[in-house]
Amino acid sequence: MGKRIAVVAPMAVDLSQEMYRDIAGKVFVNNAKKLKEPDTEIDFFLMQKGFEGIDEFAWDALNAWNSFELYETVRGLKGKGYDAIVVHCYWDPYIYPLRQYMDIPVIGVAQNSLMFAHMMGRKVGLITFSKYAIPIVEELVTKYGFEDSVVSIRSTETTTDDFLQGFLDATPIIERFKEVARECIKDGAEVLVPG
């Protein structure tokens, strides 16, 4: 019997705009389809209110508001026949409150990627998009008990414009990622995790 999985990205994007529809459809949904089992359905959701770009993530007050909007979005999926919820954000926002509220698994990308990376090597390097994200990622690493495994956390310094453009042409972001990846490897990382 097939499964239904809801993937919720904690951003509010106007899907009436052609570019954003293309981004959501071609990138998120199509990539998820490559990884899923044939009889699994994946639905992708963006929030109605909240961040409209990645630059806002640096502000704690805005994160609190955005996390509440994420909570409300996921709460609205309760009883809709989903077998699991994936929060499509490396910071695992509101994972524990969502797990308390929902009666199905709520999966955090950071927690799962760290567990998987730990199986692949002893020393992990994390690459995030902004220097402002580094303290948040450091906090997650400690919270999940991986502070002895993560040897490097670095940033590609990506703006919202770079991020959106990357969905249309990822070449510049990939090149910057490679540069930062080399720095993480110099720090001793055996496994690299984008976050």
Image: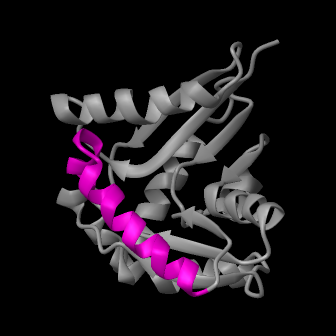
| Magenta residues, start to end | 163-187
Question: Which residue occupies the foreground of this view, 136 or 45?
Answer: 136
Quadrant in which residue 61 is drawn: bottom left
Q: Position of residue 45 (x, y in %)?
A: 45, 36
Image point 71% across, 13% down: which residue?
39
Query: At x 54% / y 84%, what residue is drawn?
Result: 186
165 within the magenta span: yes
Taking the image as drawn, is residue 60 in sight? no
Picture coordinates of residue 48, whole percent (x, y): 34, 43
Q: Across the whole image, how many numbered discs are drawn on residues? A: 0
On the image, the x and y values in percent for residue 103 come to: 79, 42
Q: Residue at x 32, y 66 (%)?
A: 176
Q: Is there any visible trace of residue 5 in the rendered image?
A: yes
In-image side of 126 versus 132 (left or right): right
Residue drawn at x 62%, y 44% as measured from the top left: 86
Q: How does the figure colour the protein chain or chains?
A: one colour
Q: Quadrant of residue 62?
A: bottom left
> Is 77 positioned to the left or the right of 124 in the image?
left
